């Protein structure tokens, strides 16, 4: 993990570019960084790790509003998560770096910035996992 991520809040860090897509992080480093992004989980897809978080929103359109808030952050960061709206009110966000087939420091930075969004008015209840 870079020294910057050890010291600074993740929300204050812009993308870390090492190579074209950021610095790959292994399972051990991911286990340390996950503690900095409340409510996110490390999940395995085959051999690759991903970050995943789910919420229940008040209505279908509130889910779309949530997508817009997340999309604005993702565009600013140049890093785009997978967004899922299942049923009418179940929102799930998955983050990983497709180009490296796993997690980079940039994934955790994006998760922290999503956490910093004011989305309480959209939520039916507290975030679920």
Image: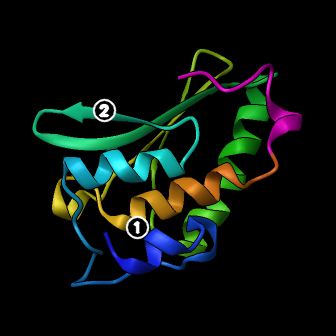
Decide whether residue 123 is among the magenta residues. Answer: yes
Q: Residue at 41% of width from left, 53% of height from top?
A: 33
- Disc 1 is placed on an element classified as helix
Location of residue 88 in the rendering, given as x and y in whole percent from the top left corner:
67, 17
Identify the residue position indicated by label 1 in the image. Answer: 106
Choose top left, top right, bottom left or bottom right for residue 87.
top right
> Which mark is first along the chain, 1 or 2?
2
**Residue 54 at what x, y percent from top left?**
56, 28
| Rendered image: mark on residue 43 | 2
Seen at 65% across and 46% down, the residue is 67
Which mark identifies residue 17?
Answer: none
- Left or right: where does residue 106 sit relative to residue 49? right
Q: Which residues are magenta?
A: 119-129
**What quarter of the picture does the N terminus occupy?**
bottom left
For this view, does 22 lie left or right of residue 54?
Answer: left
Residue 26 lies, with reference to residue 60, above or below; the image says below
Q: Which residue is at the far top?
A: 87
- Is 124 placed above or below 102 here? above
């Amino acid at each position: 993990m870079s020294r910057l991520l050890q010291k600074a809040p993740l929300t204050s860090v812009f993308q870390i570019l090492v190579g074209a897509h950021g610095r790959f992080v292994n399972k051990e480093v991911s286990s340390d960084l996950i503690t900095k992004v409340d409510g996110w989980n490390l999940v395995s897809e085959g051999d690759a790790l991903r970050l995943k978080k789910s919420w229940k929103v008040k209505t279908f359109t509130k889910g779309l509003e949530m997508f817009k808030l997340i999309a604005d952050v993702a565009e600013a960061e140049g890093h785009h998560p997978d967004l899922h709206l299942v049923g009418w009110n179940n929102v799930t966000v998955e983050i990983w770096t497709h180009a490296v087939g796993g997690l980079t420091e940039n994934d955790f930075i994006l998760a922290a910035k999503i956490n910093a969004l004011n989305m309480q008015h959209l939520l039916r209840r507290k975030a679920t996992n």
